[in-house]
Image: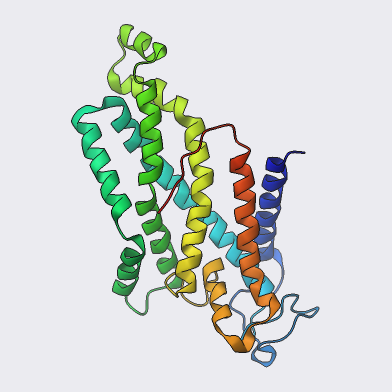
Amino acid sequence: MSNRTIAATVLALVLLASLAVSFIPGASYSRQDREFAGAAPSARFPLGADDLGRDRLTRLLYATRISLLLAAAAAAVTIAVAFLAGGIAGYFGGWCDRAIVRALDLILSLPWLFLLLAARALLPLNVSPLYSLLLTYALLAALGWAAPARVVRAGARGFRDSEFVLQARAEGCSEWRVLWRHVLPNLKPVLLAQFWTTIPVFILAEANLGFLGLSAGEPLPTWGTLLRELQSPLFLRPEAFAPAAAIAVSLLCFKLICSNSSTPLGGSQI
């Protein structure tokens, strides 16, 4: 069994476990048992309880589901935008290419952390935790498509004068049809590679924002918000590092999946 298969299996099992927690009676990420605040690991609380008496394991499983699924959804939106922008720029060239490349340079030069800080500061204090979290990932998707678009643009430029494109033109296909039916489908391996490399980037970005208190509000858990417990020395125990371990394992799995791919990768960045 290859490392890629093992990594994909581990990710699938982790995601299934995070989905299965919804079917456990009484498992709630917001339930508080104040008499067990800061409780050590036990049969009732396998990873102990936080400072509000909430089960760390339950919150970790819900956070795993939220972080993985929303990071994948944001990555899918990012790759879709990069697919269109990079494909159009690389295939048509000329003023269209120059305009999109300037937009890519502008987005890549923006201080994304300060933009997220400003956007979070503009939200009212009573905004729902879910809305705050969705806005965070929407901003990540809006800022993250530029780097994959560069890779798609390079691939589209390489196919622009290939034999099958010239043949399609000779048969009377319009330029848009050639782009949509012949060029872009051949970029799917590149897009898949970009998708797998973008997910861990978004996971780390949300973890940083959550640690700073700029992701989801209480009581909604994400890996980033769970890391905030490490700021409290009173409840700093080994089990409090479980979210960091989950992030490390997931990033390792994504790295193994990407490194064993034969498709050339272009780093996605924010």
**x, y (%) of residue 170?**
32, 7
Residue 97, picture quadrant: top left
Residue 259, picture quadrant: top right
Q: Seen in the image, is 5 located left or right of residue 157?
A: right
Q: Seen in the image, is 62 located left or right of residue 185?
A: right
The coloring applied to the image is rainbow
Position of the N terminus, as image quadrant, is: top right
73 relative to 29, above or below: above
**x, y (%) of residue 102?**
23, 42
223 relative to 150, above or below: below
Q: Which residue is drawn at 64% across and 81% down?
A: 54
Q: Which residue is drawn at 32% across and 50% down?
A: 108
Q: Which residue lies furthest to the right in this view?
A: 43
Residue 248, picture quadrant: bottom right
**x, y (%) of residue 164?**
41, 12
Q: Which residue lies furthest to the bottom in this view?
A: 35
Q: Of residues 121 and 66, which is closer to you in this image?
A: 121
258 relative to 240, above or below: above
